[in-house]
Amino acid sequence: MADNTFKVSIITPERIFYEGDASMVEFNTVEGEIGVFPNHIPLTTVIAPGILTITEDSGPKNAALHAGLAEILPDKVTILAEIAEWPDEIDVQRARDAEDRARQRLANKDENLDVLRAEAALKKALVRQNLK
């Protein structure tokens, strides 16, 4: 591992999504977007839905990252993600349909509606479409 890179591990319940060396990682947290470089201060944070960018020597890789936790150490970033998807794993029509359903649920304002769940579904659908 070169001095200008660090180890990155992204793990979901179904698989090891990514393991490799990166010079930078960017993703959304509940407090805003974060960019991580080698020798970052130790930090644990909660992930918010958004696009994850992993910058390797060969260039950037983008993925959809929906929720989870990140542990940042000076020489390693570990992300425990609920869902992580590469662009070629995303079905755009399915994401559009999910967006329509979420928007309809939010617009109807049913008294039994779980607003946070509907908003989360909408964010996931939009992230998937933006990545694709």
Image (cartoon, grey):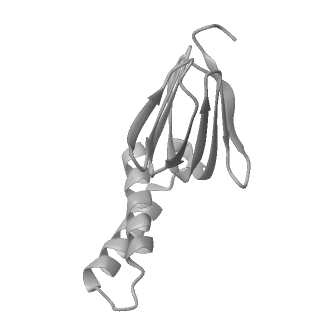
Q: Residue 132: tell me if it is visible.
A: no
The answer to whether residue 46 is left or right of residue 100 is right
Q: Position of residue 4 (x, y in %)?
A: 57, 10
In the image, is residue 15 above or below residue 124? above
Q: Residue furthest bottom?
A: 111
Decide: is 115 above or below 25.
below
- Locate residue 18: give its quadrant: top right
Q: Position of residue 47 (x, y in %)?
A: 50, 48
Observer able to see residue 95: yes
Q: Is residue 19 above or below residue 68?
A: above
Q: Quadrant of the C terminus?
A: top left
Say which residue appears at 56% left-offset and 13% top-offset: 57
- Residue 112 position, x and y percent, is 40, 91
Please give left or right for residue 45 compared with residue 102 in the image. right
Q: Quadrant of the N terminus?
A: top right
Q: How many marks?
A: 0
The answer to which of 43 and 126 lies nearer the viewer is 43
On the image, the x and y values in percent for residue 100 come to 34, 71
User: For the point 37% across and 68% down, which residue is it?
Assistant: 119
- Residue 56 figure quarter: top right
| Position of residue 35 in the picture relative to residue 18 (left or right) | left
Name the image quarter holding residue 82. Answer: bottom right
Q: Which residue is located at x 43 percent, y 43 percent?
A: 28
